[in-house]
Every structure is written in structure tokens, then in C-alpha cells.
Image (cartoon, rainbow, N blue to C red):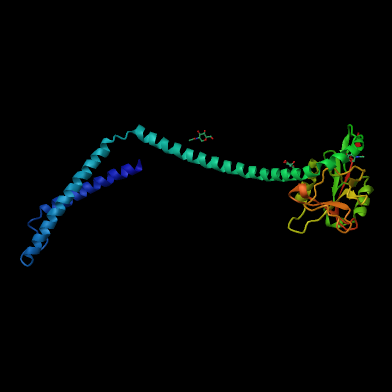
Amino acid sequence: MATRQDKREMSGTNFDGGFDALSCKDNNEEHPPYPPSNHGSQSNVWQVILAVLAVVLLIVDISLGAHYKILTDTHLTAEDVEQIRSEVTYLEDSYKNVTTTMQEAQKQLDSEMGSQTETNWELEHQNKRQTDYKAQMDKMKNDIASMRTDLSMIVGGCRHCPPGWILMNSVCYYFSFSESAGLKTWNKARDFCKMYGGDLAVIDSKDKENATVKILLNNEDLSKPLNGFWIGLRDSDQEGTWKWLNGTVLVEGYWNDGEPNDANDEDCAAVYAKENFFKAWNDFTCGATMKWICEKAPTSTS
Ligand SMILES: *[C@@H]1O[C@H](CO)[C@@H](O)[C@H](O)[C@H]1NC(C)=O
Ligand SMILES: *[C@@H]1O[C@H](CO)[C@@H](O)[C@H](O)[C@H]1NC(C)=O
Ligand SMILES: *[C@@H]1O[C@H](CO)[C@@H](O)[C@H](O)[C@H]1NC(C)=O
């Protein structure tokens, strides 16, 4: 719209200016631009050049005039202007929408790539599990009876955890994050938990493992060497049979690659703030000093 108007104005200016200049030169025969006496032949050449220029200008002016007429005939009514304006607005809207859609698509792509990684981890983990699945089945059969013990359900009342403990899925947990808590051997850590009527934490499901490691990831300074946190799992009979504190045989472990390796009599298990929580465990000598995680049932008051 603006461009067309500009063109029209420009062509108008050229038309007037060009024609005026032309007629001015043509009618000024009595005041020739150069004295004819000294430069007779040169003056003739100039006159020819001027005449040619005049013709060229005339042709240019005529064609510009014709162009101007076409533009005038194009008939731009107020509705046309309005329509063009709304088309421009529509195009701007479309552009914004496309930009927004692209940004959203990018976000979605990013988040799907994220969950894809975790899915791959899980797949890798499951493949690894499958190889010793049969052995695990035997262990599970042996322990099926002990697996069927009563779960003490808390009926009614408020559930309380000691100060500094957190309630997660109806269980109180203690993570020895603070510097002042220091480091303890597996047995000393266990004593600490028992002092509160609890014990070292049992992480016997994927969801517990996921939640535990997420808490570690959220609270540990990941730029420093990672702390290990003792859990209630040990290799009690020196035969590589890992058992939870209550005697249940380990069914599904979340060991790091190559662990447990039982190097130097490593008979106690610790969990780390590893992003791939399926590979967050390591075995250590029980006398090593580490941080630790306790669990206990909440006390209820009614
Ligand atoms: C842009 O998106 C809005 C709402 O998302 C919608 O109402 C509008 O019609 C869209 N505009 C175009 C030009 O697609
Ligand atoms: C040991 O603890 C786990 C988790 O708390 C529980 O599922 C299991 O039944 C317990 N086994 C025994 C023998 O108490
Ligand atoms: C781990 O827990 C988070 C929520 O904290 C959940 O979004 C994610 O799907 C869980 N991962 C697995 C493999 O269960």
C-alpha cells in the first residue's frame, strides 16, 4: 500500500520536473548556453545531444505518465486499503502463531528426549535383570513366606516423624546431610537409627529407590565428590547373598556397573546421588565411614 503511493508520487514529480526542464530548454533559443562564434561545431553537437536528451526525456515522461495512469486506474478504494491492512495483520498473526507453535514443539521435543533417556536406562536395567532372573526366582520362592508378613497399618490419628526426619509414603526417613552429623561406620549408623526407634533404610522397590535418589540429588552438592549413604542391606553370610535388615533376600538390586564386587570384604551397601538411579548402589567394607539413611514408622497420636 505505502509502496504504491510512493511510486505514484515519485512518478508525478518526475513527470512535472522533466517536462518543465524540457520546455524551458526548447524555448530558450535566443539565449544559447554557449557562444556560437568560437565553438560553432561544438554548439551543434550540444544541440544534437540536447535534442536527443529531450526526446529521451519525452519518452520517459510519456511512459511514466502511462504508468501513473495505470496506477490511478488500479482503483484503490478505502475497502481495498482496509482489506490489505487486515491481510497484513493476519499475516503478522500467522507469523506469531507459527513462532509460538515452533517454540512449543521444541519444548515438547526436549521433554520427550529427557524421558526417552530414562526409558533407555530402565530398558538396559531390565535386560540386565533378565539374565539372572531364574536365580532370583529361586530366592523369591524361598522367601515368599517371609514376604507375607503383616504390614502394620497406621489407623487414624496424625502421623509424626522426629524433628529433622521427613515423611514419605507413610514412612519417616532421616538423611544425614548436615556436616555436623559427620560420618559413621555401617554399625554406628545403624545404632543412630535405632536410637530413634528405627533402622537403616530398606529400599526394596523401584519407587523407593527413585524417591530416595531424587532426595539425594536435590540435597547433595553434585560438584563435590559424592557421599555414599549406608542403607540397611548387607552381605551377611559371605556367599554373596545380600539381605535386608529383616532377613529378606535382595530381589532387585540397583547396583552400579561391576558392583557388588566384594573387593576387600565389601559387605555393606551404600546408595549415591546418581542421576541413573538404577545404578546408584555400591558395596563397601562395613567399617568405612559414610553418611546414612534411617527409616522408622511414624508415631501416631489420636
Ligand atoms: C492465532 O492463534 C489464535 C489463538 O491461538 C487464533 O485465535 C488465531 O485465529 C490464530 N491466527 C492465525 C492467523 O492463525
Ligand atoms: C522386610 O522389610 C520389607 C520392606 O520393609 C518387607 O517388604 C518385608 O516383608 C520384610 N520382611 C520381613 C521378613 O519382615
Ligand atoms: C521417578 O520418579 C519421578 C517423579 O519423581 C517420575 O516422574 C519418574 O517417572 C520415575 N521414574 C521411573 C523410571 O519410575
- Quarter of image, res 209: top right
The percent position of residue 262, horizontal first and vertical second, equals 86, 55
Q: How many marks?
A: 0
Q: Quadrant of the N terminus?
A: top left
Horizontal side, residue 244 vs residue 115: left or right: right
Q: Is residue 81 left or right of residue 166?
A: left
Asked if residue 101 can be seen in this view, the reply is yes
Residue 37 location (% of width, % of height)? 5, 66
Farthest residue, direction left: 37
Quarter holding the C terminus? Answer: top right
Q: For residue 204, say whether it is visible.
A: no
Residue beneath the point at 19% across and 50% down: 18
- Taking depth in this image into account, of 38 and 238 the one nearest to the observer is 238
Q: Locate residue 235, reporting x and y percent.
A: 90, 50
Tell which quarter ligand 2 is in.
Answer: top right
Name the side, left or right, on which 250 lies relative to 84: right
Tell me residue 168's x, y (percent).
82, 41
Q: Residue furthest bottom?
A: 38
- Residue that appears at 7% across and 63% down: 41
> Closest to the observer: 136 or 117?
136
Horizontal side of residue 184 vs 275, given as left or right: right
Query: What residue appears at the point 16 percent right and 48 percent down from the top-left corner?
Result: 58
